[in-house]
Amino acid sequence: MKRIIIDGEHKLTGSIRISGAKNSAVALIPASLLSDEVVAIDNIPDISDVEVLSQTIEYLGGNVKRNKELIELSLENLTNKPISQEFSSKLRASYYFMGALLGKYKKVDIYFPGGCSIGARPINLHLKGFEALGAKITEQGNRYIIEAPELKGNHIYLDVASVGATINIMLAAVKAKGETIIENAAKEPEIVNVATFLNNMGAKINGAGTSEIRIKGVDYLGSCFSEVIPDRIEAGTYVIAGALMGENLKIENVIPDHIESLLFKLKEMKCDLKVYDDYIIVSKTDNLEPVDVKTLGYPGFPTDLQQPLTPLLTYCNGKSTIEETIYENRFMNIDYLNNMGANIEKIDDKHITINGATHLKGAEVKATDLRAGACLVLAGLAASGQTIVNDVEHVLRGYENIIEKLTNVGAKISLEEI
Ligand code: EPU
């Protein structure tokens, strides 16, 4: 087990450079399978999810070369093979092999994906999309065999604007016959990143980033060069760290538009924030005002930032609220924050009230999932005394070099293996 130890209340000053987006990189790597040539992707973060996906590409006969942030995938000699449960359950993004292998070979044999336990996280919309393209699905417990004699474009409406389903249907549809239209598509920047990547390979996708995506099937996808966009959730997490403990903390390589909903909330709280074209400077300030936050699909407030925001809300003078509308189980950080001296009431699975201001004190806590872990690391940076965050494997999965990045700006933080 790995744990992070933080000696709190140290000022954060200097600059933190944001890495490539986890949730883009984990889609681009499986998407590369659709190419029959060599694809190069720059700005790939050095996180374990990328490692696991790269190993799967190699298992399928691809060749993966990595040079710092650049990854080159040679895909000329692939074969379609079953993906084991051991692999599928390692991460959520294993589900992108469904769309990619189905799109390329018209058949995939795979298991239900893993990922953080933050709610039910069904994949019914992914499957409904594949069926609409002509696939037949055989479920054997957790195993899915999905095959189609031929994939044909169709008009698909998503009941929920799901990021994963939107990307997976795009992957399955790029080489299908005719046109596919996805209605009520998710609009997250990661979807635009994947569509641009596929278009660079020769796909014909229009409308990514809006709620209607149109895909005209093509026969062949070739080589391309693409870049992963900066990670908006990592950027948001460090901007919040700056609001808690920063002294002119510079967050670099950010697309501010991608975190506009967070920046508006921070301004409403009267945080000291200066936003430039591709960087943000943030400092701690007293007398923060309470706010109400409701998580929504993009461009609404991201569910992935509600847990990291919570420690800052404990420092606001008055009652803040969070309504979580995406997941059923994303408040597992709250008991730990209360152990650290916060005064947060869980109203139900979807609502909490944060009564501030309180001052956080160090405690021993546990990262139950990736963003809960990020929340507790931020809490530890602001808290007096020592905080120990146990089970941080989740955190390391999503934040490249978090210890180095925070140490470089003055945090007293270390990683221990026990
Ligand atoms: N949903 C369904 N049926 C489906 C798919 C989704 O009902 O077939 C529901 C989910 O239960 C959830 C909502 O739709 O209530 C949204 O889920 P979505 O499919 O958009 O999420 P996801 O694709 O599983 C990705 C990110 C998550 C992020 C969400 C929302 C990846 C690998 N994961 O998950 O990232 O929270 O989009 O933005 O891209 C994280 O990074 O910590 C993380 C959990």
Image: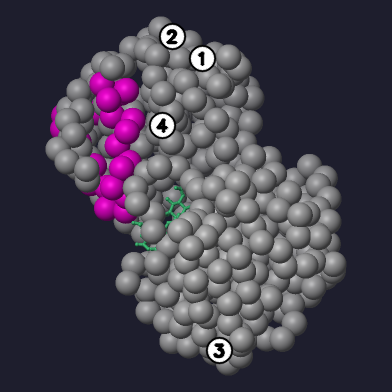
Q: Residues within 10 Å of mark 1 (few under 14, many from 20)?
A: many
Q: Separation of disc 3 and disc 1 at Cα?
A: 53 Å
- Residue at image position (58%, 29%) is 402
Between discs 4 and 1, the one toward the N terminus: 1
* Mark 1: amino acid: Ile
* Mark 4: amino acid: Thr
Between discs 4 and 3, the one toward the N terminus: 3
* Mark 3: amino acid: Lys
Residue in front for this viewpoint, 234 or 51: 51
Q: Are marks 2 and 1 in contact (CB under 8 Å)?
A: yes
x, y percentage for residue 350? 22, 45
x, y percentage for residue 141? 45, 58
> Which residue in the structure is indicated by mark 1?
5
> Which residue in the structure is indicated by mark 2?
386
Callout in the foreground (2, 3): 3
> Which residue in the structure is indicated by mark 3?
152
Viewer can see residue 126 = yes
Magenta span contains residue 83? no
The total number of labels drawn is 4
Q: Separation of disc 2 and disc 3 at Cα?
A: 58 Å
Magenta span contains residue 335? yes
Residue in front for this viewpoint, 195 or 319: 195
Q: Separation of disc 2 and disc 1 at Cα?
A: 7 Å
Q: Quadrant of residue 273?
A: top left
Viewer can see residue 231 = no
- Label 4, secondary structure: give it: loop
- Residue at image position (78%, 54%) is 58
Callout in the foreground (4, 1): 4
Q: Are marks 4 and 3 in contact (CB under 8 Å)?
A: no
> Which residue in the structure is indicated by mark 4?
368
Left/right placement of residue 325 relative to residue 91 reads left
The residues colored magenta run: 316-338
